[in-house]
Image: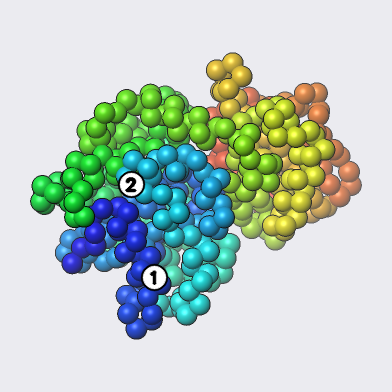
Amino acid sequence: MPPPRNLHAFLTFARRSLTAPVSQRPSPLTFVVGNESGDLDSLCSAILFAYFRSHAAPKYTLHIPLANIPREDLPLRPELRAALAYAGVKSEDLLTLTDLDEIKDLKPDDTRWLLVDHNALTGTLAERFGTRAVGCVDHHEDESFVAADTGDEPRVLRKSGSCMSLVIEYCQDVFDGLSKQTDTAEDGADLKDLENGLAHVALAPILLDTNNLKSKAKTTDLDVKIAEYLEGKVKKYKRKTYYTELSELKEDISQFSYTDNFRKDFKAWTEAGMVLGTCSIPQGIHYMLKHLGDDKTLLADFRKFSEDRKVDIGTIMTSSAKDDGVFKRNLLVWAFNAKAVKAVEKFVESQTEALGLAPFQDGRLYYKGENEVRYCWYQHVTKNSRKQLAPMLRAAMREAAKL
């Protein structure tokens, strides 16, 4: 029997299933989780992939969407709150790592994990459930974490601007099937309202991740195709208006501290015995220094943030077009120990020209010592985001480890 079709009711049903006594809990539980950055693409992709998979006939196997962030981090994402509101859902309705930690009797062998917007579990989830990944839908470099043969589960690894485009493509038959059932959805919600809400949630990350489908570096034919498909299901909708609403909310970082901004979109990898930490921020370094705090505050807060996460190489990757409408990037890279210094210098040697790196404000924020170095650049080759920069840094870490 399928779960409720109303998205809020579905999330409530998923929560009850997870928190039920062991004797009443489905076994195994199937989770859908995005990457640890907890950005809009990861969060919305997990919600909708779980929703559509749970409504796939004939099994209607419940898939539980999990936000890969602590509950306390939900308020840092006003753009998520806005997108979910179209479907009658609040951020607080989502299950988070905090909720998962409260389920003390959940054994790894009683779980299955489907990954969206990444293809390798990281952090505490990897430590606890690393052997339980059964499939993935992702647009990043293959980490060879998920088995090559996933049986009936998906192993989708393709280029797209947004992972959501791959999710909707995979689940399109189920989405279309909702309209072939009754004229009225459960809980008294009109079917058109249901489709409108789901489509708005899906469109949000696609539009944000592709700069309203205008970024030549990110937008693929699939993103355009899926966006047009979804727009056929929405009511009273203007693409530019919706994109502007979301982007303004995402880019208003002045309401948060440096530390809040660092943790809002953070991802980490372990490579060659070192930890690489990456923070993605939708405003430039100049904006941050003007609105969040001076050089001393930025550096002190980022050092503390990195130390708390046992990071060897910390990076801040920014993107912004606010000043004059021209898209720009900054990149700050900080090595916190001698081993990390070798890796960062290898990165500088191999990627400075390829990325068009030039000193930020004549070397402002630079530091060079024997056991610590810090660079801050203008990144003139703006087509490269974290999706490309993280593999470059990780490659440098591997190369430096051989020296």
Give the amino acid at mark 1.
Leu
Residue 150 in view in this figure = no
For the rendered model, the colour scheme is: rainbow
Residue 18's label in the rendered image is: 1
* Residue 281 spot, x, y in % from top left: 60, 37
- The residue located at (38%, 44%) in the rendering is 84
- The kind of secondary structure element at disc 1 is helix
Q: Which residue in the rendered view is the most extreme toward the top? A: 324
Nearer the N terminus, badge 2 or badge 1?
1
Give the amino acid at mark 2.
Gly
* Residue 147 spot, x, y in % from top left: 41, 64
- Location of residue 136 with respect to 197 vertically, above or below: below
Q: Which residue in the rendered view is the most extreme toward the front? A: 188
In depth, the one of 308 and 119 nearer the eye is 308
In depth, the one of 226 and 54 nearer the eye is 54
Specify few, some or many for label 2: CA neighbours under 10 Å numbering under 14, 14-19, or 20 or more. Answer: some
Residue placed under numbered mark 2 in the picture: 88
Residue 163's label in the rendered image is: none
In depth, the one of 154 and 300 nearer the eye is 300
- The kind of secondary structure element at disc 2 is loop
- The residue located at (56%, 23%) in the rendering is 321
Residue 62 sits in quarter = bottom left
Q: Is residue 80 left or right of residue 274?
A: left
Q: Is residue 1 left or right of residue 90?
A: left
